[in-house]
Image (cartoon, coloured by chain):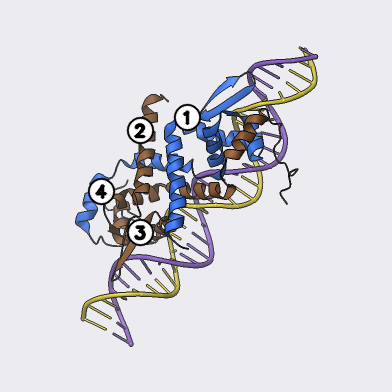
Chain colours: A brown, B blue, C yellow, D purple
Amino acid sequence: MNKKNDVVCDCDVIHSEIVNEVRLEMPQEEKLYDLADFFKVFGDSTRIKLMWALDKKELCVCDLAVLLNMTKSAISHQLRSLREARLVKFRKVGKVVYYSLADDHVKQILEKGYEHINESRGNNND
Amino acid sequence: MNKKNDVVCDCDVIHSEIVNEVRLEMPQEEKLYDLADFFKVFGDSTRIKLMWALDKKELCVCDLAVLLNMTKSAISHQLRSLREARLVKFRKVGKVVYYSLADDHVKQILEKGYEHINESRGNNND
DNA sequence: CTATCAGTTGAATATTTATTCAATCATCAA
DNA sequence: TTGATGATTGAATAAATATTCAACTGATAG
């Protein structure tokens, strides 16, 4: 499977030199899937809110549920995604689980994104 | 609608002081939706590949279709998302449309993400 | 004009995924 | 032990979305 002639593309290459150059610079397929999966976690407003809040303060599930006005269950499901992507960390104190941002990377990415949406608004007019 | 007692949350706040503090630091609801929508564009491996390729070289739709082994249609649909999020720009030369990355922000975000998935792999062992 | 090719578009389908609901686990207090 | 509470989980449903397919546009060459 996936032989060289297993071609889905419906057209001929126009600039084969350049395409070959670029092909050599592409990371492993798997890495790019991982990268997409990583960003997928940022692509939901609930999780964005959770990350933004946790960037400010360490909070437990109930606090987050109140803050976002959602059920504990919904919050917990989304925190699971964030945990699996290693975007948040947590500690248990009795029954209470406190969540916080995993590291500074997350904050930096959030901020870069925030910059982008604010800037491109100003430059472009639509 | 959306009165104060229109409460979905199924629990009581535990640390009301802190929750109130955090609430004041949250950006407008709409901004957070925009931010999620922005990151949503990064959350697909086809678009990640397109961005990665376009970061290296300016390419036309056929080149991209060959590079990713997908139909022009599929590529074009995804380029549309990238255009709408202002992540790529393009120029027309005759029948051919050349795409490239919109600005350095995009590259920076891609790189930060790439760093994260590589680093968190190393630190954690699962 | 006509045929061809690069690219775009809209509708349909298939897949993914966010939230809900109900059940469950784990810890603590009575 | 029992009841209450914080939190997690799995299945189900509803909504979002990636790719395909077919039709179409617009530019170029004959």
Residue name at image x 29 percent, y 53 percent: A67
Mark 4 vs mark 3, foreground winner is 3
Disc 1/disc 3 C-alpha distance (Å): 34 Å
Name the N-terminal-most of marks 1 and 4.
4
| Residue C15 x %, y % | 60, 52
Residue name at image x 56 percent, y 30 percent: B57
| Residue C27 x %, y % | 30, 75
Can you identify the residue that label 4 sits on? B23
Residue A78's disc number: none
Chain to which the residue tagged by mark 1 belongs:
B
Chain to which the residue tagged by mark 2 belongs:
A
Mark 1 vs mark 4, foreground winner is 1
Q: Nearer the viewer, residue A4 or B6?
A: A4
Can you identify the residue that label 3 sits on? A89
Disc 4/disc 3 C-alpha distance (Å): 21 Å
Disc 2/disc 1 C-alpha distance (Å): 15 Å
Mark 2 vs mark 3, foreground winner is 3
**Image quarter for residue A119?**
top left
Q: Quadrant of the C terminus of chain A?
A: top left
Can you identify the residue that label 2 sits on? A118
Q: Is residue B13 above or below residue B59?
A: below
| Residue C30 x %, y % | 21, 81
Q: Secondary structure at mark 3?
A: strand
Kind of residue indicated by mark 1: Ala
Chain to which the residue tagged by mark 3 belongs:
A
Q: Secondary structure at mark 1?
A: loop
